[in-house]
């Protein structure tokens, strides 16, 4: 089973995102989530985001976030907590107005201390800042309400607040499209340095790794890329791995290719001492956030795919 194999191979965990509503509604889905030998780590897919936890100013709600946190606690699985400062799934009371720095700083600090405070001691890691870099050719910082107000100063503000709220959680920057060693990757390296230079703590960089079948770099290229981050003194992890087909149903050869691609991604984490684990962003095609991509390790009937077998053989 994948987590047992991953731990034997030197990782801290192999995990999956868990969908709050589906855990509640589908027993088959829930039973596999509950198997800590398969998934030793869980991430709540939506329940800890800003719109779920503080939809109105100062009115904190944890019903949804507590679902996956509760499952992980019951089963003894690690919990990655996701996410605090993100431009998306951000209520319009935050995104829809212009702020002075002091006003938005206290909103950020209150959000972080309340949400992290609620889960204090339960999170192996927190994605403190998510997707702060754009996909434009220069890899500019994303023009969110946070960037508009603070330029890059909101990074140290957020990471310092996170350290104060739960000193034992690993504090991560998390983003996608960092896997191709382009402008966005360079910017993420700069971001880590900038946070450290501001005297703020950062422990890790999460590579979401939302990939396409046939579009993953080689295992060696990925390992080198991860090493360029661990060289800065941070750990790394694949935090949202999925590999989508261009069209479905996928041919047998596309399913085999998907397996090779998964094996290269997972294998690259094994090759880097500072790569702590792999989280897949949903384990089953039936409920995957990517529609018509069959991106997961289990098919819609909960059967293990060729990709599952490839991952199990590389571990
Ligand atoms: C996605 C969820 O999977 C969906 O259910 C939701 O509708 C939108 O967000 N990057 C992230 C994740 O950091 O939080 C996103 O999750 C996928 C992309």
Image (cartoon, helix red, strand yellow):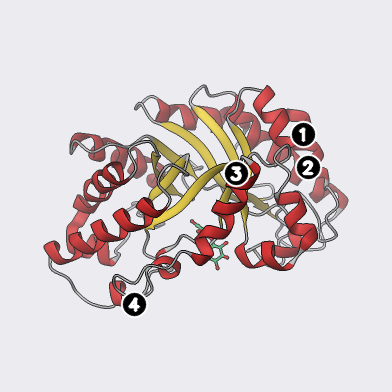
- If the image is split into quadrants, where does the N terminus sit? top right
Distance between mark 1 and mark 2 Cα atoms: 6 Å
Judging by the rendered image, the residue that carries numbered circle 3 is 279
Residue 88 image point, x, y percent? 41, 66
Of pointers 3 and 1, the one earlier in the residue sequence? 3
The answer to whether any part of residue 137 appears in the image is: no
Residue 15 relative to residue 98: left or right: right
Give the secondary structure at mark 1: helix
Q: Is residue 241 above or below residue 85?
A: above
Horizontal arrangement in the rendering, residue 300 relative to residue 172 (left or right): right
Q: CA distance from mark 3 to mark 1?
A: 14 Å
N-term mark: 4 or 3: 4
Residue that numbered label 4 is attached to = 92
Q: Tag 3's secondary structure?
A: strand
Is there CB contact under 8 Å for labels 4 and 2?
A: no
Which of the two residues, 98 or 120, is positioned nearer the viewer here? 120
Within 10 Å of disc 3 (Cα), the crowding (few <14, some 14-19, many 20+) is many
Residue 131 percent coordinates (x, y): 40, 55
Between 292 and 30, the one nearer to me in the picture: 30
Question: How far is disc 4 from disc 1 in space, using C-alphas?
Answer: 43 Å
| Residue 84 quadrant | bottom left
- Residue 159, position as x, y percentages in the image: 28, 45
The residue labelled by disc 1 is 312
Write down the residue under mark 2: 308
The reply to whether callout 1 and callout 2 are in contact (CB within 8 Å) is yes
Q: Is residue 169 left or right of residue 304?
A: left
């Amino acid at each position: 089973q994948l987590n047992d194999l991953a731990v034997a191979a030197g990782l801290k965990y192999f995990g999956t995102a868990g969908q709050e509503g589906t855990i509640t509604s589908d027993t088959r889905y829930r039973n596999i989530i509950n198997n800590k030998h398969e998934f030793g780590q869980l991430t709540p897919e939506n329940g800890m985001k800003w719109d779920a936890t503080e939809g109105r100013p100062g009115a904190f709600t944890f019903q949804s976030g507590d679902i996956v946190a509760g499952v992980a606690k019951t089963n003894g699985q690690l919990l990655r907590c996701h996410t605090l400062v993100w431009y998306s799934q951000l209520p319009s009371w935050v995104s829809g107005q212009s702020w002075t720095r002091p006003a938005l700083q206290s909103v950020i600090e209150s959000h972080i201390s309340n949400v992290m405070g609620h889960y204090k001691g339960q999170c192996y890691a927190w994605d403190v800042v998510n997707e702060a870099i754009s996909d434009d050719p220069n890899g500019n910082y994303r023009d969110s309400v946070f960037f508009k107000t603070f330029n890059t100063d909101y990074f140290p503000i957020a990471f310092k607040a996170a350290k104060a709220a739960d000193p034992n959680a690993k504090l991560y920057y998390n983003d996608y499209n960092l896997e191709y060693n382009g402008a966005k990757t360079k910017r993420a390296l700069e971001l880590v340095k900038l946070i450290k230079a501001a005297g703020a703590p950062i422990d890790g960089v999460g590579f979401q790794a939302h990939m396409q079948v046939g579009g993953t770099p080689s295992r060696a290229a990925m390992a080198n890329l991860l090493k360029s981050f661990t060289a800065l003194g941070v750990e790394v992890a694949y935090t949202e791995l999925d590999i989508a087909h261009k069209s479905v149903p996928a041919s047998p050869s596309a399913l085999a290719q998907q397996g090779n691609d998964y094996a290269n991604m997972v294998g690259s984490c094994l090759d880097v001492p500072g790569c702590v684990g792999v989280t897949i962003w949903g384990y089953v095609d039936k409920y995957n956030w990517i529609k018509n991509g069959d991106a997961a390790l289990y098919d819609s009937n909960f059967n293990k795919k060729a990709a599952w077998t490839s991952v199990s053989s590389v571990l």
